[in-house]
Amino acid sequence: MADSERPANTSATEGEINIKGQDINNIHAETVTVRFGRAGDIQANTVLVSQAGVNNIKADTVELRQAGAQAVEGDTVTVRQGGIVQVKANNLSVTQGGLVFSESEQAILSSSTAGAVLAGGNVSLDQSAVKSVLARGDVAIDQSAAGIILARNIQTGSNTGAILMIAGRVDGEVNSVFGPAASAAFGAAFALVIALILWMRRQLI
């Protein structure tokens, strides 16, 4: 196990690494814990970042507590009072956090904000604000606000607002700006723009 006396601005490769108040550039390990410090790139099975910042993380399980990261890729990503610029995960959970762009299979946001949320499955928004949600599955939104929601089915709760909803079925009350006719016309143009964005993103990766 590495201790907190590891010199700053170095790389580390071990089975388990704990960082407290230190700066390390590159880390490869089974388990990594970062507290009150900063790390460049981390590759591990399990990563916990608390009150610290990280550039890039690739791990099976990632948890951020009052922490931030530029890019995170993992199977299960949990954010509690933290922020991520870009995240890719199978299961994403955010509580009192913020995201710019997320791509996941399932996403749950509670008391959080996000720019764009892309999901292959279902999305749940509770007391959250999201600019756009694109889900192949269902979207449940309660006491939240969204710019655009595109999903198979949408279930809305109380105090919910959206600029535009496009779905096979919408259950519940919602304050929407566009009616059915305007939504259909806008939806066709929106789908074309999204397709172009996704194509450009694939070219840049």
Image (cartoon, grey):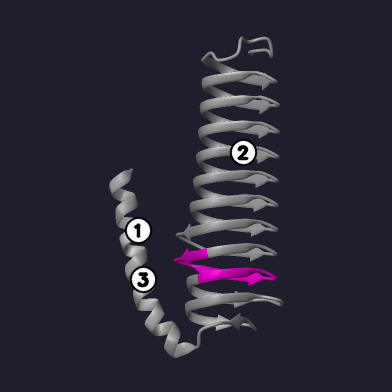
Quadrant holding the C terminus: top left
Residue 86 horizontal/vertical position (percent): 50, 46
Circle 2: element type: strand
Residue 105 horizontal/vertical position (percent): 49, 55
For residue 122, above or below residue 21? below
- Label 1 packing within 10 angstroms: few (<14), some (14-19), many (20+): few
- Badge 1 or badge 3: first in the primary sequence: 3
- Label 2 packing within 10 angstroms: few (<14), some (14-19), many (20+): many
- Does 142 lie within the magenta span? yes
Query: Which residues make up the magenta segment?
Result: 132-148
Q: Which residue is drawn at 69% across and 45% down?
A: 80
Distance between mark 2 and mark 3 Cα atoms: 32 Å
Q: Which residue is drawn at 52% across and 20% down?
A: 25
Residue that carries the numbered disc 1 in the rendered image: 197
Amino acid under label 1? Ile
Distance between mark 1 and mark 2 Cα atoms: 26 Å
Residue that carries the numbered disc 2 in the rendered image: 68
Circle 1: element type: helix
Residue 173 horizontal/vertical position (percent): 65, 84
Residue that carries the numbered disc 3 in the rendered image: 191
Residue 67 horizontal/vertical position (percent): 66, 37
Q: Which residue is drawn at 40% across and 79% down?
A: 186
Residue 109 position by quadrant: bottom right
